[in-house]
Image (tube, rainbow, N blue to C red):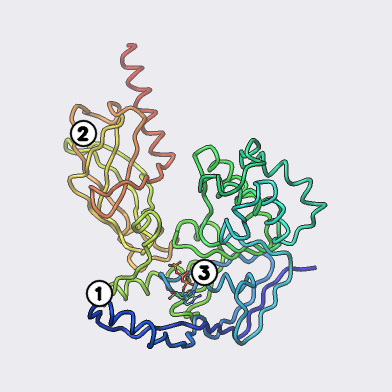
Amino acid sequence: MSAYIKAKGICLDVPAFLQREREASGWLGLFMGAAFDPPKRRLMRLLSDIDFELHEGDRLAILGRNGAGKSTLLRVLNNVYQPTSGTLEVNGSCQALLNMSLGFSGEATVRENIYLRGIAMGLKAAFLRHQVDPILEFSGLREKATHRLRTLSSGQKMRLGFAISTSVQNDIMLMDEWVGAGDAEFMAKAKDRMQDRVGGAKILVLASHSVGLLRNICNRGILLEQGRIIYEGDITSALKNYHELLAELRARNVVPEVAEEAAGGAQVYGCAETIRLEDGLFVVKGWILNSEGAVPGGVVVEVDGRRYIADRVEHHSRRDVAAHFGLADDRCGFHAYLDIPGAESVRDLGDSIQVFGGDAPERADAPLRVAPGFTTQLVNARRNRTKAKQH
Ligand SMILES: Nc1ncnc2c1ncn2[C@@H]1O[C@H](COP(=O)(O)OP(=O)(O)OP(=O)(O)O)[C@@H](O)[C@H]1O
């Protein structure tokens, strides 16, 4: 049977308890206020008139700034919240990667938690028996199988949650950000599995601030603002509308608030495409943008572990990149000019160069992708130097 999601006129109201703001005029006043002025209950509308249909092959990006309602909508799709009005039809097995530790019990053992969580996911005990070993293996927690969950580190709990949640392929996947957990070795395994699961899902719904990720994975997008869909369309036009909304907010001096993620700042993406020497300065060309659709100005090049800050970064129009990411501002191309003492040509740089971007040089710590052409340039330069030495 085919998988689909049909949301018609969904609204969600939740009760909010509001306490009157009052000046604390001493302890007695505070206690009396708490005793005789109980919080008022008021209904708050978190989602209004949400309408969309998803069918097989749809990969939907949910866009919106902080507090727009993305996670709330995912929770409604996952039946965590019942809509106050409207109808939701979900056909197909559904897996939500929303909260990795949902359904865990700290007092139960790791093995027991696999059953608890698996059953909460709708899996049968007989089926789960065969999943326990692969889950312990994948999460690297085989020797902890009989330990109580509360004795595990948060990274280990995350690994376990990830291994259980992704142990089976489902028709529909709901995701709040791309899941990455644990150390580098686990991350690599997790990435492969995520790619498998995402590729195997018939329908994917992904809420994220990561524009590059959404652009790569999704083919459709909805833009939420204050719990309403303000735009729906293909991913390119949805991203364009999202960036236009952010640009408009910035123009009105409203902080768009999309960047308060764990990393503590807007995510920076980009690519270093070429490097050459021009009038004694190295010029790195490429493109750069951040998750707010703005163009960061800091570029740093790391050669053999030493950081060199660009003296000057010039921005240029890159319509190809702007069209790909749906940017409101197409000046995301950059030429970064650097002085690298001791290097007189590209061949002196070696081939272990990394390029980083950020809002300012001192915060330029987001690695930019290095285009194959860039690497080829360095490798050819090194080869030429070796040949020249031999002659
Ligand atoms: N159970 C709840 N009770 C009251 N308010 C809530 C509840 N859940 C969410 N909200 C409010 O609803 C709004 C939307 O929250 P939600 O977490 O869906 O935003 P979001 O778009 O996912 O944001 P972010 O990008 O920061 O993750 C916020 O203002 C939040 O404070």
The residue indicated by pointer 2 is 340
Residue sitting at x 28%, y 48%: 364
**Mark 1: few/some/many CA within 10 Å (<14, 14-19, 20+):** few
Q: Earlier in the sequence, mark 2 or mark 3?
A: 3
Up/down of 309 relative to 177, above or below: above
Residue 370 locus on image (x, y percent)? 40, 42
Q: Are marks 2 and 3 in contact (CB under 8 Å)?
A: no
Q: Is mark 3 within 8 Å of ligand 1?
A: yes
- The residue closer to the viewer here, 317 or 260, is 260
Using the rendered view, name the quadrant where residue 340 is placed. Answer: top left
Q: Secondary structure at mark 3?
A: helix
Label number found at residue 71: 3
The residue indicated by pointer 1 is 253
Q: CA distance from mark 2 to mark 3?
A: 46 Å
Q: Secondary structure at mark 1?
A: loop
Label number found at residue 190: none
Q: Is mark 2 within 8 Å of ligand 1?
A: no
Up/down of 107 relative to 47, above or below: above
Residue 97 locus on image (x, y percent)? 59, 59
